[in-house]
Amino acid sequence: MQKFSAQIKKSGKTIALVPTMGYLHEGHISLVRIAQKVCDATIVSIFVNPAQFGPSEDLNSYPRDLEKDCALLKKEGVETIFTPTPKELYPAGYQTYVNALHLSEHLCGISRPALFKGVTTVLTKLFNIVSPNKAVFGKKDFQQFVIVCQMIKDLNFNIEIIGAPIVREADGLAMSSRNAYLKKNQRKPALSLYKALKQSEQLVKKGEKRAETIIGAALKLINSFDETLIDYISICNLETFEEVKIIDCPVLMALAVKVGKTRLIDNIILSP
Ligand code: PAF
């Protein structure tokens, strides 16, 4: 891969990387289309990264379908798919990790302590291997997007990070590979995340500025379904993820909710 990308660059072409864990959906495809617009060559990596899963998380059951992914990407005109194996990226004796200290201590980092260290480590490796000019990330994982931007700055990567809007199903559910876990009767409870975010947006539109009131209403809506278990609902600073009490500038409202065994995340920017 390193040799291959050096050749592409030698021929004067630019490279955009779309890092994924596979089981691709329309959200990933939207990232691919952005990559194709901003660079000459698009490389999609597919790697279910063991380093970002905690011991009791869904590494083994994470959905995988490489054949279908390759067919989808081929249809989009993607010529290069990079699919390293866990042994190739983390051979015996592997010991170096990259960690964004403070940004990882909020939101998803609290209940998934391994997540962001694993993400920044694997992205460092993928960036060193693929050497892209640009890399595209979806903003459904808003915290991941901000942490990657911080890492690029802190570690002097010469890569432009592009954030892409959340892609939703027709009913509003944010697209995610993990939606494949949802049973038919869990669709409604899963939709409560989006409904709570839209409700919050409406409250802010009507002039509500108190985060506590908005979070309270979201809690009520999501808890009205038996199958939901809230991990967190946070209204916080867009760059630091510190909680805010009064919404007087654009802020992030982010939430993570378990529906049955499936952990879903979603977010919205609330602007007064
Ligand atoms: O967002 C994801 O799918 C993963 O966290 C990423 C960025 C591919 C790193 O494994």
Image: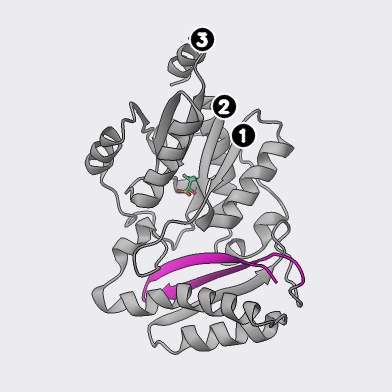
Q: Label 3: state its secondary structure.
A: helix
Question: Does the residue at mark 2 contact the one at mark 1 (Cβ under 8 Å)?
Answer: yes
Q: Quadrant of the N terminus?
A: top left
Spatial CA distance of label 2 from label 1 is 6 Å
Quarter location, residue 241: bottom right
Q: Amino acid at mark 3?
A: Lys
Say whether residue 146 is left or right of residue 165: right
Q: Is residue 249 magenta?
A: yes
Examine the residues drawn in magenta and state their main secondary structure. Answer: strand
Q: Amino acid at mark 2?
A: Asn
Quarter location, residue 80: top left
Q: Which residue is mark 2?
A: 133
Q: Which residue is mark 3?
A: 10
Neighbor class of circle 1 (other Cα within 10 Å; few <14, some 14-19, many 20+) is some
- Looking at the rendering, the stretch of residues picked out in magenta corresponds to 248-272
* Earlier residue among tags 2 and 1: 2
> Residue shown at 62%/31% (left/top)?
159
Spatial CA distance of label 1 from label 3 is 19 Å
Q: Which residue occupies the extreme front position in the image?
A: 206
Q: Is mark 2 within 8 Å of ligand 1?
A: no
Q: Which residue is mark 1?
A: 160
Q: Is residue 259 visible?
A: no
